[in-house]
Image: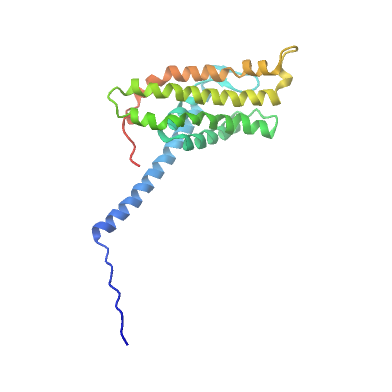
Amino acid sequence: MRLRVSPCRSVSPAAHLLREGTVVTKSSNRAGLIAEAGLVIALAVVLNALTVVQMPQGGSVSLVMLPLFVFALRRGVGLGLAVGAAYGVIDAIIKPYVVHWAQFILDYPVAFAAVGLAGLFSTAFVSARGDARFVRGAMLVVVPGILLGTVARYAVHVISGVIYFSEYAPEGTPVVWYSLAYNAFVLVSGALCLLAAPFVLRAIPALRLKDRS
């Protein structure tokens, strides 16, 4: 009878430390990402409280979308959509204007998730951060990103307005035109974000650094 002795596979200390370091790095990155998302939502809440114009049936002119745009451009469209939707739910808790459950979904999580579509330009934004002329290069990406997110949110609010707020349209005014005009506060807010973007890009040195993933 022959006994087979399996060779013992030993793991070198260096390999073991490398493996542990990888786990720690991934955990740290995950924790940092969660902290960043929480900070972005908190900033959005503060900026939404600093309204320029408050609309009567919900909505306001503010810089609320600015931190959501920055996060989406840094982290990509998937995380941008998720954090935008999370903020939308929080906004509904803080400043609710709900007439129907479907209107709640449209005007809050879906509308603010749409802001995260700016993350479609994330790859180009990350590449621009390595350029010496960072602000100029980044703005070529930030502008279309902000425009896309703004128009997407505006479209969602317009649809909600046509379906659920037609009673507020003045007599003789087509509800579509009324909704387009009322929800123009989103376009004004997007314009403010465009004006503020260059200052934000200059003021946050961390944006110049490439993330370690």
Residue 164 to residue 24: above or below: above
- Residue 121, quarter of the rendered image: top left
- Asked if 95 appears above or below 56 in the picture, the reply is below
Check the image and name the residue furthest to the bottom: 1
**The C terminus: image quadrant:** top left
Viewer-nearest residue: 103 or 94: 103
Residue furthest toward the front? 1
Name the residue at 50% across, 30% down.
117
Q: Horizontal placement of 93 versus 192: left or right?
A: right
| Percent of width and height locating residue 187 | 54, 18
Foreground pick, 43 / 117: 117
Q: Is residue 47 visible?
A: no
Say above or below: 53 vs 163: above
Q: Residue at x 32, y 55 (%)?
A: 20
Residue 105 place in picture, x, y as percent: 63, 34
Query: Residue, x 42% and y 24% (percent of image)?
Result: 142
Which color mode does the image show?
Answer: rainbow
**Residue 27 percent location from the top left of the image:** 38, 48
